[in-house]
Image: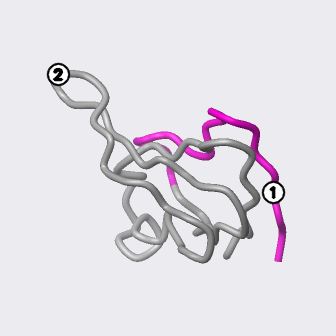
Amino acid sequence: MEQKTYSDEDVIFSEGEAGNSAFLVASGAVEISRQSDSGKEVLGTINAGQMFGEMALISDKPRSATATASGETICVLVP
């Protein structure tokens, strides 16, 4: 499986994009957010050992939120 390193505030994927993989956080953290009428709404934080991005694969719909690295973060891509 492919591993990617992200710097602080790097966008891993954006709301509305097509999804072709999920991500496992190997180290660091990822902020999950979406845009609402009042601006950016933070939905939560994904930490090391947790997975995110799988809903786009399950639902076969565009990404419902944006994932942004919080600090240096290493993710394993799960096809």
Q: Which residue is mark 1?
A: 4
**How did the renderer colour the structure?**
one colour
User: Does residue 33 belong to the magenta stretch?
Assistant: no
> Where, quadrant-wise, is the N terminus in this rendering?
bottom right
Specify the principal SS of the magenta part.
Answer: loop
* Nearest to the observer: residue 19 or residue 1: 1
> Where, quadrant-wise, is the C terminus in this rendering?
bottom right
CA gap between label 1 and label 2 equals 32 Å
* Amino acid on which the number 2 mark rests in the picture: Ser
Position in image of residue 65 (x %, y %): 38, 47
**Extreme residue toward the left, this view:** 37
The magenta span reads 1-18
Query: Relative to 2, does residue 17 appear above or below in the rendering?
Result: above
Q: Tell me the number on the disc at residue 32.
A: none
* Nearest to the observer: residue 43 or residue 11: 43
Query: Relative to 51, does residue 5 appear above or below in the rendering?
Result: above
Q: Which residue is mark 2?
A: 38
State which tag comes first along the sequence, 1 or 2: 1
